[in-house]
Amino acid sequence: MTIQIHMPMNCLSRADIIKVDFMNTDEAARIEIETLAKQLGKEMVAEKLETREDYETARTAGYHYFQGYYFSKPSIMSTHDVPAYIHTYYGISKHIRSIDPDIDMISNLIEQDISLSYKLLKLINTLGFGLKHKVTSIRQAIVLIGLMELQKWLYVLAVREKDWNNGISYEIMSNCLIRARMCESVAKLIPGKINTSGHFLTGMFSLMDSILNLDMEEILVQVPLDEAIMDALSGKSNTQRDVLDLVLAVEKADWVQISKGCRKLGIEEKDLFKVYAESLNWAKELMEDKKM
């Protein structure tokens, strides 16, 4: 459950996470909320951060999560190239998505990169995935978690790479993971059986233009994504785009669009905010375990 600051103070004790709108809340109100949140042991989200000063204020005040236009500016990262290891990940992903994927070939490609092999096995073993036994080989990992899950975690590792860190990019990468997880989780809430695998990558790649300081069109030329994902990232209407738009509305606390989006997708708002809280915690866990 996520509580906004315009709600009565006695509601805060029932919240899992408290969001504070920095654009529409004065300093006195923020301090009051921050003090009470700390007393109650609640995690805080600082939203609508527009400037570096806003971010530093929120960070100093002890906020756990950060959102806003400041993290979506293309000037965040200076590089204009997709790092070499990212192309390796994309190449493996392309084999995974082939009509008749060869598990032995895929495992061999991963094993050729010692660093990638170690990171992938460590991540899988650390997070558990509900497996009864530790994973000891790449082939075993592929068999146990499946090709689509493997593809997803390759992209997670790509986003977590330390070489991407530059200034506040940690927060951007964290938001990237939050969007990915939330898009996947929201898709699972939609009535009827739909393929949710593409929603994860739609959410993840929705911030790649900011991370790489490139136009989205240029990025989509370089990566082997499904057509539905590419359409969604290009702004074309489809289910992935509807889910992404709803996730963006949650980030902005745009209640009108949240209501419209939930009605359009046939999901309950209370379920939406439950997966939002879960996504925040999931991304935090991943980023805190990035010593790989």
Image: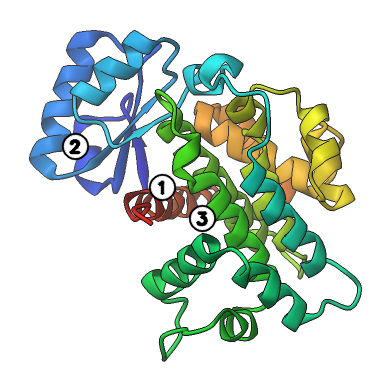
Q: Residue furthest bottom?
A: 132
Tell me the quarter of the image containing the C terminus: bottom left
Residue type indicated by callout 2: Asn
User: Is 115 above or below relative to 161?
Assistant: below
Of the pair 279 and 257, the residue shown nearer to us: 279
Q: Position of residue 278 (x, y in %)?
A: 42, 55
* Sequence-first disc among 1 and 2: 2
Question: Does the rendering let one see residue 279?
Answer: yes
Q: Position of residue 113 (x, y in %)?
A: 59, 63
How far is the residue under mark 2 from the one under mark 3? Answer: 22 Å
Tag 1 and tag 3, C-beta contact below 8 Å: no
Q: Name which residue lies at 66% across and 43% down.
A: 84
Q: Name the residue that disc number 1 marks.
A: 280
Left or right of 42 in this view: 85: right
Q: Residue furthest left?
A: 39
Of the pair 181 and 247, the residue shown nearer to us: 181
Q: Name which residue lies at 57% across and 49% down.
A: 158
User: Which image quarter: residue 282?
Assistant: bottom left
Element marked by disc 1 = helix
Element marked by disc 2 = helix
User: Which image quarter: residue 144?
Assistant: bottom right
Q: Position of residue 122 (x, y in %)?
A: 42, 69
Q: Of the numbered discs in the image, which one, if any, rests on residue 271?
A: 3
* Sequence-first disc among 2 and 3: 2
Residue type indicated by callout 1: Leu
User: Is 144 above or below relative to 112?
Assistant: below
Q: Of the numbered discs in the image, which one, if any, rests on residue 10?
A: 2
How far is the residue under mark 1 from the one under mark 3? Answer: 14 Å
